[in-house]
Image (spheres, grey):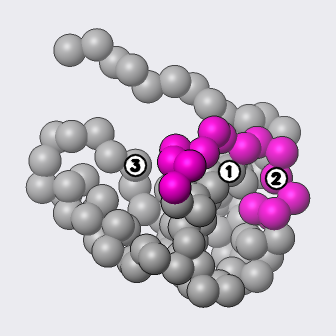
């Protein structure tokens, strides 16, 4: 089976280990000022994915999403061989759900 992973690491950004202890508000600040923005996966949902660390991205969903996405990802990662990003942290702010992977 081919390996489709791409090395998207950004050497100019800190590693997740360096910023993982920051409070949620600081992660939101990093997210909002981030220049490493990925294309929106859907024009119908208010979802944004941005690289906040050299080895982590943060996905912010609108209020229609709960933390069930993180739970589902963790379940798939633990129970199957399907490659799924590890969930590093989840939190809510401004009626939105943030997922760090």
Label 2 SS: loop
The reply to whether residue 70 is visible in this rendering is yes
Q: Are marks 3 and 1 in contact (CB under 8 Å)?
A: no
Q: In the picture shown, does residue 26 fall above or below 16? A: below
Decide which of 89, 62 is in the foreground and name it. 62
The label shown at residue 85 is 3
Instruction: Determine contact: label 1, label 2, CB under 8 Å.
Output: yes
Q: Which residues are magenta?
A: 30-44
Q: Residues within 10 Å of mark 1 (few under 14, many from 20)?
A: many
The answer to which image quadrant residue 12 occupies is: top right
Q: Residue at x 52, y 24 (%)?
A: 6
The numbered mark at residue 50 is 1
Q: Of 20 and 84, which appears nearest the observer?
A: 84
| Residue 19, horizontal then vertical, whole percent | 72, 65
Q: Which residue is mark 2?
A: 34
In the image, is residue 21 above or below residue 61? Answer: below
Q: Is residue 35 left or right of residue 97?
A: right
Q: Which residue is at 57% across, 59% downward?
A: 47
Q: Which tag is nearer the camera, tag 3 or tag 2?
A: 2
């Amino acid at each position: 089976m081919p390996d489709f992973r791409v090395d998207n690491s950004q050497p100019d950004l800190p590693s997740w280990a360096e910023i993982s202890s920051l409070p949620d508000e600081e992660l939101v600040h990093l997210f909002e000022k981030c220049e490493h923005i990925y294309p929106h996966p859907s024009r119908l949902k208010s979802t944004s994915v941005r690289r906040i660390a050299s080895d982590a991205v943060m996905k912010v969903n609108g209020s229609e999403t709960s933390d069930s996405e993180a739970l589902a990802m963790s379940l798939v990662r633990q129970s199957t061989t399907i490659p799924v990003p590890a969930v590093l942290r989840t939190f809510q702010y401004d009626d939105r759900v943030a997922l760090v992977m």
